[in-house]
């Protein structure tokens, strides 16, 4: 313990040296920008800036790249809240309640809560990273395909809590998402599925273009097509800060999101987007006013935004403690280390104390920098809403197209975005929710791959899911959830007449 | 229809002088793009960046790296295959360049590109794969591993970077040479494959040396043998499969520079010269040293021969693996 603090003090000496501090600041700034631009996420940002770090020393390079990573998680909420366009994939859930808050004139409050939530999550998860990295990393590696499959099954049950409207409609959308997720090369056999000769579809349909299309473009079209043009919101300065009630509502979701995000972030392969989905579902389940979700619930912003931030720290656990990537972004950062002659591996913490402790300390500093950077920007960003729609929306459309193109240098992605934008418009006109499509699209390839990998490991025996302790426990929990979900169905079935009467009155049952 | 034809004719007439001018201007006079068909940070990308910097210095002309990832590299490679052979679009490819068209053939699909659409320019590095197992497992030597695998076919499992991927092919060549049968767990990349090995979900793996040396030093993994034609300098105690009597198990993860076929001879000569000089630049050498990847520079006829021999080996490997569902039917 004492040793940890001595090391941390050393780390702060590294992190606060002007050279490192400057690059931490730069990374945070670029990250915020990357997060704000629709479509461009941390992976694209880090990839674009990776070559620029080749001339730096290893510590500065890693500190800057990490700054971009967690900075993007701060910035990602901005366009989600203001314009319903996910700044990066993990902000999809923020679109729903964040934008609803903005329409109620609480944009400033939503942005401030997202920033503070991200700060708390960022800082608390660095503490966890510092103390728990080595033991947790070994635990994380025990998540093989069967455990991952069980976790995803548990995650899929989350679907049940995602929608605000009819269950049937939500499931239909989820299935559509799952179907879209089937497109691409089958990882287990090498088959091209549903690609129709388009090589670009080999990797499947990307989450980013679909999310930007379904959420952002559909909103633009809905606004343009509204019979009565929507009023431009004019935020007043004193309404920028969250009220006392809003803080109270945000407090526990922030902490729950922090823990959830960190734990999900550690497991190799899982994305931040899942942590935000799970956090949203948990908050909705725990909330005393679940009916507020989708209509501007504070917890629906605070939880997922905290979760996606602490998931970034979680993702650093296997990277720093074992030198293995937990996802595409840590993989790029590991490559950056190798470029600088640092071989990432289990001995990294011992061999490169400057790098490790400097990195940890820089994350404490970086989170403060981001808070200072983001809170005053709330006032500035909110003014975007003053821009009249005929000017604002074409600009957003342009940025969305550029952003989506930039991720893969792919025109096909732009077409996918436009097509899903149209699809989203039609679906929302018909009163369908689009979030389950994104969840289905994210989960389908992972679920399928982990199931088939598990069966490849066991040579086709399904027993592998129950003989391995972690997966057995997770699947058990999933079963309990299903049974709990069935109970009201049975009890409600008894008084169906009463429900029918309610339905006739137009009240949701 | 008529109007379209007129339009095309006018367009062609307008473009013809431009094309002519382009043919006459000295090479290079515009920025050169090196296409990397994989995401940034991968092996190909880490070769391309320092090479671009060195080429820029040698040619005194901007050289940019463009990551065009997708479909295991097929997207970027197809892009280059159909680019104009003017020396302004180059490709940095890995061994997988000759695997993808073979796999396409296997499934009877229209191939995204064919190998003879490219002109091989230079080989930059060729690192043999290394057979590693978790250190708590009983096998101390490759012989013990192979004997055990022979005793219980299909029970020892290995992870790979993906079906028909380089790491899968290496294991396939070994299985064929040694007459053993292993259980295959494909993953989505070299990183996840190492995770599966370290997490104890499989027993063994073929990996590039740079990715596993840190884990070998930390005592987590044990190297058993290498696929090279001689011992790897970083692992001098590890024998090669050739030494052990399996000369067919020879495999390298290599990185090379290609151009679309049909470069004008003058451009080709200029590029050959520039590549030779770029590889000798101290910055490039340093960058490769840090990656723990020895430079293995080959050009012209020498590289072409290496490339063709390698492509033949891999094509045979892909055919032997065959289509997965056909194999399942064999079992019944």
Image (tube, helix red, strand yellow):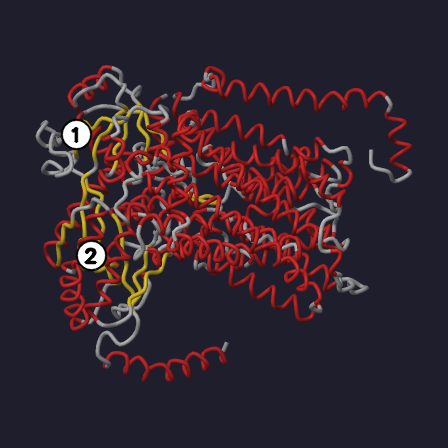
Crowding at dot 2, Cα within 10 Å, few <14 / some 14-19 / many 20+, comes out as many
Of residues B254 and A137, the one nearer the viewer is A137
Residue A199 visible to the viewer: no
Of residues A473 and B107, the one nearer the viewer is A473
Q: Quadrant of residue A222?
A: bottom right
Residue A248 x %, y %: 72, 39
Quadrant of the drawing holding the C terminus of chain A: top right
Residue at image location 22% in from the left, 26% down from the top? B222
Residue A417 x %, y %: 56, 56
The earlier-in-sequence mark between 1 and 2 is 1
Residue at image location 62% in from the left, 46% down from the top? A116
Q: CA distance from mark 1 to mark 2?
A: 29 Å
Q: Which residue is mark 2?
A: B284
Residue A118 x %, y %: 58, 45
Query: Viewed as shown, does residue A137 lie left or right of B46?
Result: right
Q: Quadrant of residue A224?
A: bottom right
Residue B121 x %, y %: 18, 60
Query: Viewed as shown, does residue B115 lie left or right of B193?
Result: left
Crowding at dot 1, Cα within 10 Å, few <14 / some 14-19 / many 20+, comes out as many
């Amino acid at each position: 313990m004492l040793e940890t603090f001595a090391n941390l003090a050393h780390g702060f000496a590294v992190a606060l040296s002007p050279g490192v501090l400057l690059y931490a600041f730069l990374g945070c700034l670029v990250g915020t920008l990357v997060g704000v631009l629709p479509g461009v996420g941390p992976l694209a940002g880090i990839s674009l800036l990776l070559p620029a770090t080749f001339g730096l020393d290893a510590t500065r390079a890693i500190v800057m790249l990490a700054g971009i990573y967690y900075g993007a998680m701060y910035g990602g909420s901005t366009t989600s809240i203001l314009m319903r366009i996910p700044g990066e994939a993990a902000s999809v859930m923020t679109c729903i309640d964040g934008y609803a808050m903005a329409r109620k004139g609480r944009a400033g409050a939503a942005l401030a809560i997202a920033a503070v939530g991200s700060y708390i999550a960022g800082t608390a998860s660095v503490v966890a990273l510092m103390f728990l990295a080595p033991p947790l990393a070994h635990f994380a590696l025990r998540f093989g395909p069967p455990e991952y499959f069980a976790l995803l099954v548990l995650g899929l049950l989350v679907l049940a809590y995602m929608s605000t409207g009819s269950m049937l409609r939500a499931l239909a959308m989820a299935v559509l998402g799952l179907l879209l997720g089937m497109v691409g090369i089958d990882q287990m056999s090498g088959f091209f599925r549903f690609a129709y000769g388009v090589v670009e579809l080999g990797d499947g349909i990307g989450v980013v273009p679909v999310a930007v299309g379904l959420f952002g473009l559909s909103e633009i079209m809905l606004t343009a097509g509204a019979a009565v043009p929507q009023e431009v919101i004019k935020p007043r300065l004193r309404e920028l800060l969250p009220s006392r009630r809003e803080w109270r509502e945000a407090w526990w979701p922030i902490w729950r999101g922090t823990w959830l995000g960190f734990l999900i972030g550690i497991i190799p392969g899982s994305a931040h987007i899942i942590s935000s989905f799970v956090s949203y579902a948990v908050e909705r389940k725990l909330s005393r006013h679940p009916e507020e979700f989708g209509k501007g619930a504070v917890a629906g912003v605070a939880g997922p935004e905290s979760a996606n931030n602490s998931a970034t720290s979680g993702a650093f656990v296997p990277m720093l403690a074992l030198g293995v990537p937990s996802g595409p972004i840590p993989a790029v950062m590991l490559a950056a280390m190798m470029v600088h002659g640092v071989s990432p591996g289990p001995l990294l913490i011992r061999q490169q104390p400057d790098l490790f402790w400097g990195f940890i300390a820089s994350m404490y500093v970086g989170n403060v920098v981001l808070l200072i950077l983001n809170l005053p920007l709330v006032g500035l960003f909110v003014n975007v809403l003053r821009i009249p729609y005929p000017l604002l929306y074409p600009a957003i459309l342009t940025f969305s197209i550029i952003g989506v193109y930039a991720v893969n240098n792919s025109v096909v992605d732009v077409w996918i975005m436009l097509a899903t934008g149209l699809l989203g418009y039609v679906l929302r006109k018909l009163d369908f929710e689009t979030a389950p499509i994104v969840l289905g699209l994210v989960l389908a390839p992972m679920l399928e791959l982990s199931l088939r990998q598990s069966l490849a490991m066991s040579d086709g025996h399904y027993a592998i899911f129950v003989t391995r302790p972690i997966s057995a426990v997770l699947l058990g929990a999933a079963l309990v959830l299903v049974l709990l979900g069935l109970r009201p169905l049975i009890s409600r079935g008894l008084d169906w007449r009463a429900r029918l009467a309610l339905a006739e009155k137009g009240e949701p049952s | 229809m008529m109007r379209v034809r007129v339009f095309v004719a006018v367009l062609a007439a307008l473009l013809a002088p431009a094309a002519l001018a382009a043919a006459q201007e000295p090479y290079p006079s515009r920025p050169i793009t090196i296409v990397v068909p994989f995401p940034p940070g991968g092996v190909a990308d880490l070769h391309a960046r320092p090479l671009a910097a060195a080429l820029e210095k040698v040619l005194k002309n901007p050289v940019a790296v463009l990551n065009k990832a997708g479909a295991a590299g097929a997207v970027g490679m197809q892009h280059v295959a159909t680019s104009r052979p003017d020396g302004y679009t180059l490709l940095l490819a890995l061994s997988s360049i000759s695997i993808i068209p073979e796999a396409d053939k296997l499934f009877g699909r229209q191939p995204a590109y064919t190998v003879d659409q490219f002109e091989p320019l230079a080989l930059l590095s060729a690192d043999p794969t290394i057979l590693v197992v978790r250190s708590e497992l009983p096998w101390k030597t490759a012989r013990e591993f192979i004997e055990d695998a022979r005793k219980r076919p299909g029970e020892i499992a290995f992870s790979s970077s993906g079906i028909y991927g380089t790491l899968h092919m290496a294991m396939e060549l070994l299985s064929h040479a040694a007459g053993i049968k292993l259980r295959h767990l494909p993953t989505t990349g070299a990183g996840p494959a190492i995770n599966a090995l370290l997490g104890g979900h499989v027993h063994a793996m073929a990996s590039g040396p740079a990715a596993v040396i840190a884990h070998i030093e930390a005592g987590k993994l044990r190297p058993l043998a290498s696929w090279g034609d001689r011992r790897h300098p970083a692992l001098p105690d590890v024998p090669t499969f050739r030494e052990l009597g399996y000369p067919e198990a020879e495999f390298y993860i290599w990185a090379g520079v290609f151009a679309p076929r049909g470069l004008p001879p003058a451009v080709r000569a200029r590029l050959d010269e520039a590549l030779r000089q770029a590889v000798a630049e101290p910055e490039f050498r340093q960058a490769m040293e840090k990656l723990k990847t020895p430079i293995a520079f080959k050009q012209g006829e020498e590289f072409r021969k290496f490339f063709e021999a390698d492509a033949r080996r891999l094509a045979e490997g892909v055919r032997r693996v065959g289509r997965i569902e056909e194999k399942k039917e064999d079992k019944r």
